[in-house]
Amino acid sequence: MEAEIILDKSKSKEERYQTILPKLTALIKDEPDLIANMANMAAVLKMSFDFFWVGFYLVKNKTLVLGPFQGPIACTRIPLGKGVCGRSWEQKNTIIVPDVELFPGHIACSGDSKSEIVIPKIKEDNVLFVLDVDSDVLNSFDEIDAHYLTTFIALI
């Protein structure tokens, strides 16, 4: 796999996701380590879309615990049902938040975060981890992001 992924930023969001899907698949397909794959996935997403923050929270002892990420310092632990990540874990579904200031119970790890999407990884009806992506622009995420980010975490 190439050490660098170069994207044409003039392409649509969907075209950029389609471009990185095979590259990301090749990057992680032969690597069995979860943390290594999460770290590379966070890096690929951050550099491909210039998201404000991209990272993972792993379910450990009934708490979400910070995993690999790209971006500024983040919250370390999130309880079930708290904030967007905790709610996604509790409800076992993807949550798209156009404006984090309007989300009841939002946990502000950074005041620069304006919109967010959280996708849970579910196996045998249990959430193993969540992928959390923040933007410093309002209303950054939609069903295109939900589709491809769900596809990406299915790879690991």
Image (tube, rainbow, N blue to C red):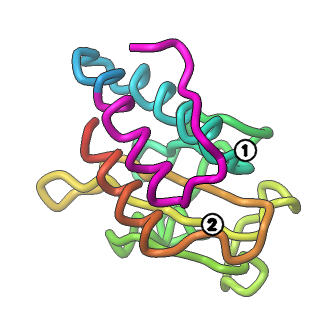
Most foreground residue, 14 or 62:
14
Is residue 3 or residue 10 the one in the foreground? Answer: 10
The residue at the point 64 percent across, 35 percent down is 47
Dividing the picture into quadrants, the one containing residue 107 is bottom right
In the rendered view, does 46 fall on the left or right side of 56? right
In the structure shown, which secondary structural element does the residue marked by tag 1 occupy? loop
Q: Do we see residue 63 in this rendering?
A: no
Marks 2 and 1, how far apart at CA: 14 Å
Magenta residues (range):
1-25
Q: Which mark is residue 116?
A: 2
Asked if the residue under mark 1 is in contact with the one under mark 2, i.e. CB atoms within 8 Å, the reply is no
> What quarter of the picture does the C terminus occupy?
top left
Which residue is drawn at the image coordinates 57% and 54% (left, top)?
Answer: 11
- For the N terminus, the quadrant is top left
Q: Identify the residue at horizontal 72%, vertical 44% (top origin).
A: 74
Q: Position of residue 124 (x, y in %)?
A: 12, 55
Q: Nearer the viewer, residue 19 or 85?
A: 19
> Which one is in front, 18 or 62?
18
Q: Residue at x 42, y 66 (%)?
A: 146
Q: Residue furthest left?
A: 124
Q: Which of disc 1 and disc 2 is earlier in sequence?
A: 1
* Residue type beneath disc 1: Ala
Q: Image height check: is 54 above or below 34?
A: below
* Magenta stretch contains residue 47: no
Helix, strand or loop status at disc 2:
strand
Toward the right, the furthest residue is: 111
Q: Residues within 10 Å of mark 2 (few under 14, many from 20)?
A: many
Residue occupied by mark 1: 74
Q: Which mark is residue 111?
A: none
Q: Amino acid at mark 2?
A: Glu
